Image (cartoon, rainbow, N blue to C red):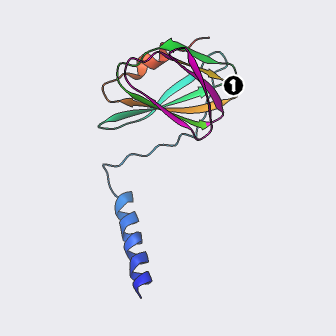
């Protein structure tokens, strides 16, 4: 009897989430439009506190060294990336995350076709990210 009540409550909870107009959803794995000459960057979602950016890399594409004015989090959703920080290289694979404080020089090089999720602070600008892609 307790399990039935628990299941019913979960169903009600899920229905309430789906009906919430303040909720946003996005898919990092749908509509993948890779660019042949440089990383493809798109804003997936903007919330009250972050901007979620998807970066699609073909093998050997890179983002030149740059700094973010606010802290960032980078997640490798698929593929492999060499992530350079202050002249040191970190080999990141699918499922791995790295966070950086503001103003840390960093660069990215794709070792294979890769999908990267970048979380920016609300005050940062997605247009800044597009400026550091190279052909």
Pick whichever, 57 or 94, lies toward us: 94
**Which residue sits furthest bottom?**
1
Q: How many marks?
A: 1
Give the left or right position of residue 104, taking residue 60 as reference. Answer: left
Placement of the C terminus among the 4 image quadrants:
top right
Please, what secondary structure does the residue beneath circle 1 have?
loop
Task: Give the residue displayed 40% in from the left and 77% down from the top.
Answer: 6
The part of the image, by quadrant, that contains residue 71 is top left
Q: Position of residue 114 (x, y in %)?
A: 64, 31
Q: Is residue 49 visible?
A: yes
Q: Is residue 127 magenta?
A: no
Pick whichever, 105 or 50, lies toward us: 105
Pick whichever, 115 or 84, lies toward us: 84
| Helix, strand or loop for the magenta stretch, by majority | strand
Q: Position of residue 47 (x, y in %)?
A: 34, 38
The part of the image, by quadrant, that contains residue 112 is top right
* Highlighted range, magenta: 78-106
Badge 1: few (under 14), some or many (20 or more) residues near its Cα, within 10 Å?
some
Q: Is residue 132 visible?
A: no
Residue corresponding to mark 1: 111
Placement of the N terminus among the 4 image quadrants:
bottom left
Pick whichever, 30 or 59, lies toward us: 59
Task: Give the residue displayed 41% in from the left and 70% down from the top.
Answer: 11
């Amino acid at each position: 009897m307790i399990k039935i009540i628990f299941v019913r409550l979960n169903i009600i909870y899920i229905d309430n989430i789906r009906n919430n107009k303040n909720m946003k959803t996005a898919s990092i794995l749908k509509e993948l439009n890779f660019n042949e000459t440089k990383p493809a960057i798109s804003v997936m979602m903007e919330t009250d506190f972050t901007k979620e950016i998807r970066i699609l890399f073909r093998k050997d594409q890179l983002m030149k060294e740059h700094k973010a004015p606010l802290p960032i989090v980078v997640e490798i959703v698929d593929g492999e990336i060499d992530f350079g920080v202050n002249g040191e290289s970190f080999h990141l694979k699918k499922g791995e995350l790295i966070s950086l404080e503001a103003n840390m020089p960093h660069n990215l090089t794709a070792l294979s076709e890769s999908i990267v999720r970048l979380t920016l602070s609300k005050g940062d600008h997605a247009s800044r990210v597009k400026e550091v892609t190279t052909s």
